[in-house]
Image: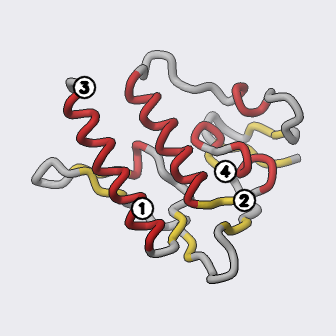
């Protein structure tokens, strides 16, 4: 896939994230596996099984459960705090991964970060706070 197509796909996902944020919805699982391509070759965000609506009083939700470590923002790993910003972080990880898939992103980048909470790696994609 050439760079122009990648940028178009990324723009489609950005528009979807902007729409979700305007509706005060946190997706919590933005990853390539949750972006679908429709018949007109427009990317659509899918799989809202982990999404949460925000209350009027807070711009984040706290969820104490398994987290996709490879896609998680630092505040998710340290504080279980999900927000529109953490969705954007996950999108950024997806863009980096799409740009250089041969390198990938390893769990230790997150689990061995200085001052981060200890994590028990449950699988290549999930971790639990210890």
Mark 4 and mark 3 lie on one chain; the one further toward the N terminus is: 3
Q: Which of the marked residues, 3 or 2, is nearer the chain's N terminus?
A: 3
Secondary structure beneath label 3: helix
- What is the x, y in percent for residue 78? 80, 48
Residue 71's tag is none
In the image, 95 versus 120, the foreground residue is 95
* Label of residue 67 in the image: 4
Say which residue label 1 marks. Answer: 47
Name the residue beneath numbered marker 3. 3
Relative vertical location of residue 125 with respect to residue 26 in this rendering, above or below: above
Can you name the residue that lies furthest to the left here?
40
Horizontally, is 30 left or right of 70 in the view?
left
Quadrant in which the N terminus is drawn: top left
Residue drawn at 67 percent across, 30 percent down: 107
Give the mark nearer the N terminus: 4 vs 2.
4
- The span from disc 3 to disc 2 (Cα, nearest Å) is 33 Å
Q: Nearer the viewer, mark 1 or mark 3?
A: 3
| In-image side of 66 versus 8 (left or right) | right
Q: Which residue is mark 2?
A: 81
Say if mark 1 contacts mark 2, CB within 8 Å. Answer: no
Going from N to C along the chain, the mark reached first, 1 or 2, is 1
Q: For residue 10, what is the image quadrant? A: top left
Dot 4: element: strand
CA separation in Å, label 4 and label 2: 11 Å
In front of the other: label 4 or label 3?
3
| Distance between the alpha carbons at the discs numbered 4 and 3 | 30 Å
Mark 1, secondary structure of its residue: loop
């Amino acid at each position: 896939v050439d760079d122009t197509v990648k940028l178009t796909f990324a723009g489609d996902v950005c528009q979807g994230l902007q729409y979700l944020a305007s509706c005060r919805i946190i997706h919590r699982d933005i990853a390539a596996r949750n972006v679908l391509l429709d018949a007109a070759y427009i990317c659509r965000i899918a799989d809202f099984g982990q999404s949460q609506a925000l209350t009027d009083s807070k711009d984040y939700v706290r969820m104490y459960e398994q987290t996709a470590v490879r896609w998680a923002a630092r505040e998710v790993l340290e504080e279980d705090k999900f927000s529109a910003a953490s969705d954007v972080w996950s999108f950024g990880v997806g863009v980096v991964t799409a740009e250089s898939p041969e390198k990938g992103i390893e769990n230790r980048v997150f689990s061995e970060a200085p001052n981060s909470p200890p994590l028990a790696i449950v699988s290549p994609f999930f971790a639990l706070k210890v």
